[in-house]
């Protein structure tokens, strides 16, 4: 998922808000900054990447923004993502999980 940092928000505050709005999950205290930042090639938009661990049985409540969600096995995670920067963020997350 992605979202815009609103006026007066930090990237972390925006991520917490976007997760809550789009999935119903309260991400306070659970976000992990992936230290991965990239720019969309279409326009000058910088993206900060975060991850959050959720309980195994958790199912998101999706608002009108996301089309769908899916869970991935660790091996091959993110390969079908359209944006290269998003695929790279998943690779950063996988390296963090393995360390």
Image (cartoon, grey):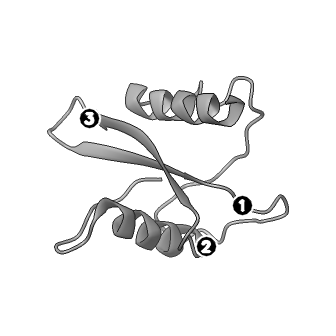
Few, some or many residues within 10 Å of mark 2 (<14, 14–19, 20+): some
As drawn, which residue projects farthest toward the right?
57
> Is 54 or 76 nearer to us in this picture?
54
Few, some or many residues within 10 Å of mark 1 (<14, 14–19, 20+): few
Dot 1 or dot 2: first in sequence order is: 2
Residue 84's spot in the image, x, y percent?
A: 41, 25
Using the numbered discs, state the Cα–Cα distance from disc 3 to disc 2 in whole angstroms. 26 Å
Tell me what residue is drawn at x 55 percent, y 55 percent: 67
**Looking at the figure, which quarter contains the C terminus?**
top right
Q: Which residue is mark 1?
A: 54
Dot 3 or dot 2: first in sequence order is: 2
- Would you place residue 53 above or below residue 26 in this image? above
Give the side of residue 18 with respect to residue 63, left or right.
left
Secondary structure under badge 1?
Answer: loop
Tell me what residue is drawn at x 51 percent, y 66 percent: 19
- Would you place residue 63 above or below residue 43 in this image? below
Secondary structure under badge 2?
Answer: loop
- Would you place residue 39 above or below residue 27 in this image? above
Using the numbered discs, state the Cα–Cα distance from disc 3 to disc 1 in whole angstroms. 27 Å
Residue 81's spot in the image, x, y percent?
A: 52, 31
Marks 1 and 2 close (CB-CB < 8 Å):
yes
When asked about the image quadrant of residue 94, the answer is top right
Is label 3 or label 1 in front?
Answer: 1
Give the side of residue 32 with respect to residue 8, left or right.
right
Residue 48's spot in the image, x, y percent?
A: 35, 47
Q: Which residue is mark 2?
A: 25
Give the side of residue 25 with respect to residue 9, left or right.
right
Tell me what residue is drawn at x 64 percent, y 52 percent: 69
Q: Which residue is mark 3?
A: 40
């Amino acid at each position: 998922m992605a979202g815009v940092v609103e006026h007066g928000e930090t990237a972390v505050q925006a991520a917490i808000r976007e997760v809550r709005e789009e999935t119903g999950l309260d991400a306070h205290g659970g976000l992990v900054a992936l230290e991965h930042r990239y720019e969309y090639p279409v326009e000058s938009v910088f993206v900060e990447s975060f991850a959050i661990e959720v309980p195994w049985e958790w199912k998101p409540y999706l608002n009108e923004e996301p089309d769908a969600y899916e869970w991935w096995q660790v091996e091959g995670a993110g390969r079908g993502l359209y944006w290269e920067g998003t695929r790279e963020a998943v690779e950063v997350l996988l390296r963090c999980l393995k360390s």
